[in-house]
Amino acid sequence: MIILGSTGSIGTNALKLAKDHNIKIEMLSAGSNIELLNQQIKQFTPSFIAIKDTKDINKVNINKNQKIFSGEDGILEALNHTKSKIVINAIVGFSGLKPSLESIKLNKTLALANKESLVVSGNFIDTANIIPLDSEHFALQELIKDKKNIKKMIITASGGALRDIDINEIANQTPQIALNHPNWNMGKKITIDSATMVNKLFEILEAKYLFHTNNIDALIERNSIIHALVQTNDNAIFAHLGHSDMRLPISYAMLGEKAKNTESIKEIDITNFNFKLSKIDTNRYPLWNLKDEILKQPQLGIILNAANEILVYKFLENKIKFGDISSNIYKAIEQFETQIKYIKNIDDVFMLNKEVMDFSSFN
Ligand code: NDP
Ligand code: MG
C-alpha cells in the first residue's frame, strides 16, 4: 500500500489502520513534517519515500534498502518504482493532482481523499478506479449499491465552525475560531473549507464525477452522523449514518470486503442525537449560491479551487479577513469565467490554475 500525505489527518489515520491490520506500506510521502515522517519510516519501513522539498532530504533517516525522492516530480518518480495496487492520496490541495494522475496512469486503484483532484479535472479523469475517501461519497456509494431507481442524491454538511455566530460578525472571525470545528478533527484547509461551505461545493462536484449525476444537493445535519441520503423514484429516502470520523471510509479503502466485519468501530447510540435536516442559508454561506452554476459549468471548479487555496492560506496567515475569502473567490470567478470554455485538456487546467492562483495572490 502507498500513502501520500502520510503526516496529515487522513494519512496518520490510515497508518493507524495499517498497524492494526499488519498492512505492508511500500511508499510514504510527506510535505514538511520530517520529524513525524521519520517516526513513520522507522515504524513501517517503506521501500520508497518522497518529500516535498529537496532541502529537507538530509533530515530524513533512511537505510541502504530505502530510496528517497524529493520535489514535485520526485513523488511521481517514486510512484513509478512501486508495485502496490492501492494508492491513498491524502495530500491537501492542488499539489495532489499530479500524483492522482500518475496513479491512474500506472493502473493503480486510487483511494482519493484529495478531492481537489476531481474538482479541477474530473472532466478528464476516468473515475472507474477511484475509491472515494470522503465520508459523504463513501455513504452514497453504499446507498446506491443494488438500487436502479435513484432520483436524487443528498450529502450533508455540518455547517462548520461559524454556524452559530451572528451573521453580521462572521466576516471578522479569526483563524483560531474558524478552525474550531464542532464535529470533525481534520487538517486546517478542509476545516476552513467547511466554514465557508467551499468543501460542500467541492463535494457536489466530486459526487457529479463519481456518480455521473447532476441530481445532487446538500443539507445541513448538525451532528455529522447522517452523511448522505438517496431518494428513489418511489420517493422513499434511504440514509447512511456513521461516526463523524473517517475510520469507516478508510477501512473500506484499505481492507476492501474484510472491512465489513471490522469490530474496531464501536456502535453509535442514535438515541443520543436529535436529527434535523435543513437548507443551507446563502446569507450565512454566500458561496453556496454557486451550487447550481457549478453543476452546469463544472470547469468553474478550477477557478474556485485555485482562488480558494490561495485565500485560505492568506486567511490562516492573518493577511485577509474571513469574509474576504468568499468575496475574493467571486472576484476571481468574474475575472476568469469566460476562459473556462477553452479548457480542453489537463494542460489547460494547469495553466488556468496558475493564472487564477497568481491573480488571487496579488488581489
Ligand atoms: P492535512 O493538512 O492534515 O494533511 C495534508 C498532507 O499533505 C500532509 O501529509 C502534508 O504534509 C501533505 N502535503 C501538503 N502539501 C504538500 C505538497 N505540496 N506536496 C506533498 N505533500 C504535501 O490534511 P487532511 O488530512 O485533513 O486532508 C487531506 C485531503 O483529504 C484534503 O484534500 C482534504 O480535503 C481531504 N479530506 C480530509 C478529510 C479529513 O477528515 N481530514 C475528510 C475528507 C477529505 P506535511 O504535513 O508533512 O507538510
Ligand atoms: Mg466530506
Image (spheres, helix red, strand yellow):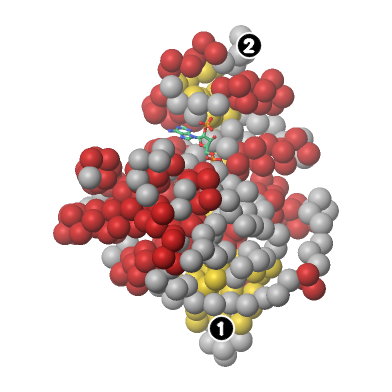
Residue 125 image position (x, y, % from top left): 39, 52
Residue 319: image quadrant is top left
> Residue at left 44%, top 67%?
167
Q: Secondary structure at mark 2?
A: loop
Residue 163 image position (x, y, % from top left): 53, 64
Residue 287 image position (x, y, % from top left): 37, 64
Q: Secondary structure at mark 1?
A: strand
- Per the model, the C-alpha gap separating discs 1 and 2 is 56 Å
Q: What kind of residue is marked 2?
A: Asn
Query: In the drawing, what numbered circle is on residue 63?
Result: 2
> Residue at left 67%, top 53%?
245
Residue toward you, 292 or 341: 292
- For the residue carrying disc 1, how many other residues have a C-alpha within 10 Å: few (<14), some (14-19), or many (20+)? some
Residue toward you, 313 or 228: 313
Residue toward you, 34 or 348: 34
Residue bearing the label numbered 1 = 232
> Residue at left 69%, top 26%?
44
Q: What kind of residue is marked 1?
A: Thr
Question: Considering the image in quadrants, where does the N terminus appear?
Answer: top right
> Residue at left 44%, top 42%?
316
Q: Is residue 22 left or right of residue 204?
A: right
Q: Is mark 2 within 8 Å of ligand 1?
A: no
